[in-house]
Image (cartoon, helix red, strand yellow):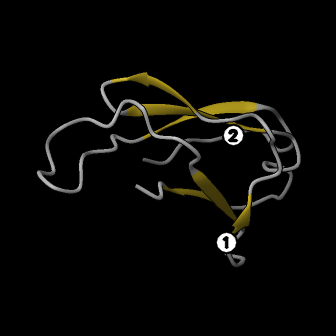
């Protein structure tokens, strides 16, 4: 889903839903360390700058903070996440 963001602002985005890899249906509500990377203006993916941990919100959806550095480049911003489990 595309959304317009102001450049260099703090924003919290929702990532998910994360579903169990064995059945593809059960919502993952207790994922540990989640790797979140951003691609700014078509550049290679790299770790996000914000140190705030992702947190489960509801039904397999997680909130993820992006800080002013993460959103500081004009152009498309893509956020991807992966969990080791």
Q: Is residue 62 above or below residue 68?
A: above
Residue under label 2: 5
Q: Is residue 14 above or below residue 21?
A: above
**Local secondary structure at mark 1:** loop
Decide: few, some or many residues near mark 2? Use Cα within 10 Å; few <14, some 14-19, many ≥20. some
Count the marks: how many? 2
Residue at 69% of width from left, 78% of height from top? 44
Q: Position of residue 58 (x, y in %)?
A: 37, 21
Residue at 74% of width from left, 61% of height from top? 47
Q: Position of residue 17 (x, y in %)?
A: 33, 40
Determine contact: label 1, label 2, CB under 8 Å.
no
Q: Which mark is residue 45?
A: 1
Question: In the drawing, does residue 49 fall left or right of residue 64?
Answer: right
Q: Is residue 17 above or below residue 63?
A: below
Question: In the drawing, does residue 77 fall left or right of residue 31?
Answer: right
Quadrant location of the C terminus in the rendered image: bottom left
**Local secondary structure at mark 2:** loop
- Which mark lies nearer to you, 1 or 2? 1
Residue at 65% of width from left, 60% of height from top? 37
């Amino acid at each position: 889903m595309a959304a317009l963001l102001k450049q260099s602002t703090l924003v919290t985005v929702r990532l998910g839903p994360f579903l169990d890899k064995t059945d593809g249906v059960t919502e993952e509500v207790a994922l540990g360390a989640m790797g979140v990377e951003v691609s700014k203006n078509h550049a290679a993916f790299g770790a996000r700058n914000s140190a705030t941990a992702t947190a489960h919100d509801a039904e397999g959806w997680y909130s993820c903070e992006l800080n002013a550095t993460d959103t500081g480049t004009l152009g498309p911003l893509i956020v991807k996440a992966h969990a080791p489990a």
